[in-house]
Image (spheres, helix red, strand yellow):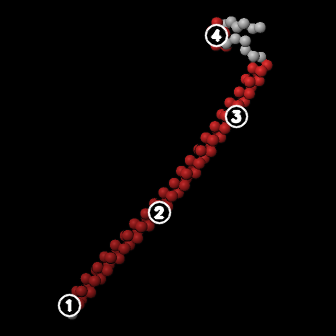
Amino acid sequence: MEKKLSDRKGGDDRSKSLEKKLRELEAKLQDENNENSELSKINQRLADELGNIKNQHQKDLEDVEFTGDQTRKKYQGMSDLEPLKCNPIKSISSRTCATQ
């Protein structure tokens, strides 16, 4: 009878120990799920931010290209009206340009 009582008490202790271990593992799993969820949110936020930066960069490139085109058109229009008669680099350094 004492052996059965001892076996039962040992089984109860083991059962309590396993239940405690199970609760610890469930808590750890919950913490890891929360961490994974937070990392997913951070990853999504970074992906969105990268997309915004990419879009802004594309707009900036388009603006630079547009400004370059406008400047090119402006100076092409000037050269159509008044072609240079001399080398502008030499004329700047010597301050003379033979205009005809």
Provide the secondary structure element on which disc 4 rests.
helix
Q: Nearer the viewer, mark 2 or mark 4?
A: 4
Return the disc, 2 or 1, that comes first in the chain's sequence. Answer: 1
Which residue in the structure is indicated by mark 1?
A: 2
Which residue in the structure is indicated by mark 2?
A: 34
Q: Nearer the viewer, mark 4 or mark 1?
A: 4
Q: Nearer the viewer, mark 2 or mark 3?
A: 3
Residue reaching furthest bottom? 1
Which residue in the structure is indicated by mark 4?
A: 90
Tell me residue 38's x, y (percent): 49, 58
| Rendering quarter of residue 14 | bottom left
Residue 8 vertical position relative to residue 25 in the rendered view, above or below: below
Which amino acid lies under the numbered mark 4 shown in the image of this protein? Lys
| Label 2 neighbour load within 10 Å: few <14, some 14-19, many 20+ | few
User: Looking at this view, is 58 or 7 the one in front?
Assistant: 58
| Label 4 neighbour load within 10 Å: few <14, some 14-19, many 20+ | few
Return the disc, 3 or 1, that comes first in the chain's sequence. Answer: 1
Which amino acid lies under the numbered mark 1 shown in the image of this protein? Glu
Which amino acid lies under the numbered mark 2 shown in the image of this protein? Asn
C-alpha separation, residue under disc 2 versus residue under disc 4: 71 Å
Q: Image quadrant for the N terminus?
A: bottom left
Provide the secondary structure element on which disc 1 rests.
helix
Q: Is residue 61 left or right of residue 2?
A: right
Q: Which mark is residue 66?
A: 3
Q: Image quadrant for the C terminus?
A: top right
**Do labels 2 and 3 touch, CB within 8 Å?**
no
**Do labels 2 and 1 touch, CB within 8 Å?**
no
Q: Residue at x 66, y 38 (%)?
A: 62
Q: Residue at x 77, y 16 (%)?
A: 82
Return the disc, 2 or 4, that comes first in the chain's sequence. Answer: 2
